Amino acid sequence: MMNHWDEKFRTDEYIYGVEPNEWVRTVLGSEQGKRIVLLAEGEGRNAVYLARLGNQVTTYDFSKEGIEKMERLAASEDVTVDTNLRDITIKDAVPRETYDISVNIFGHVPAEGKLQMFTNLVECVKPGGLIVFELYSKEQLEYKTGGPPDMNMLYDLDEIRGYLERFDVEVIHLEKEVVHRHEGRMHNGKSSVIQGKVRKLK
């Protein structure tokens, strides 16, 4: 059965573009030879970028249509991405302590799935590994330049701190920023985002 994301991605156009997110480029642009997992990766722009750098890349996403586009994009760039069709808001959706780095870029989920998504994002990383994310803040509703129109699917800093406090992590960077994003036709203009870079300690 086709879900909301399948309907959105069912077009030849890459609706979020094919270039990587700027936060991914800034934080991970020098990484090579790492095992990296991306949750809710959609059409694959960040996964393909990280694979081109020489990393072993795995993705988990709930959209079959998105995964098929991701695989086509990877093939066009002559890289391999290990794609998995899975709901990232269920327990143990991603294997634990397997990856060097985990990433979620604008992978927004319903409110009842947020804690489990963050749990999967942290628990899948080995001790010493990095967790990297950029998500829209609740203030994004004022900008209307991308992201879900549902306040409950957006984030604030205290909420994210609360999720992270459940784990033994070092918060290297966690800030709300106003940035400009130009990513396909879906993310365009001034945006309120929360950017995170966190190290898992054990």
Image (cartoon, helix red, strand yellow):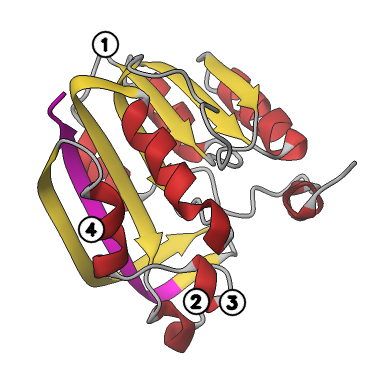
Residue at mark 4: 161
Q: Quick one: label 3 or label 4, which is nearer the N terminus? A: 3
- Answer yes or no: do the residues labelled 3 and 2 have beta carbons within 8 Å? no
Residue at mark 3: 149
Q: Is residue 191 magenta?
A: yes
Q: Secondary structure at mark 2?
A: loop
Q: Mark 3 packing: few (<14 Cα in 10 Å), some, or many (20+)?
A: few
Numbered label attached to residue 33? 1
Residue at image point 80% right, 47% down: 10
Q: Mark 1 packing: few (<14 Cα in 10 Å), some, or many (20+)?
A: few
Q: Indicate which label's residue lies in the foreground, 4 or 1.
A: 4
Q: Secondary structure at mark 4?
A: helix
How far across and how far down the image is residue 6, in percent? 78, 46
| Alpha carbons under labels 3 and 1: distance apart | 37 Å
Q: Secondary structure at mark 3?
A: loop
| Alpha carbons under labels 4 and 1: distance apart | 30 Å
| Alpha carbons under labels 4 and 2: distance apart | 25 Å
* Magenta highlight range: 189-202
Q: Quick one: label 4 or label 1, which is nearer the N terminus? A: 1
On screen, residue 115 versus residue 159, left or right, reads right
Q: Quadrant of the C terminus?
A: top left
Q: Quick one: label 4 or label 2, which is nearer the N terminus? A: 2
Q: Is residue 197 depicted above or below 31 in this figure?
A: below
Residue at mark 2: 145
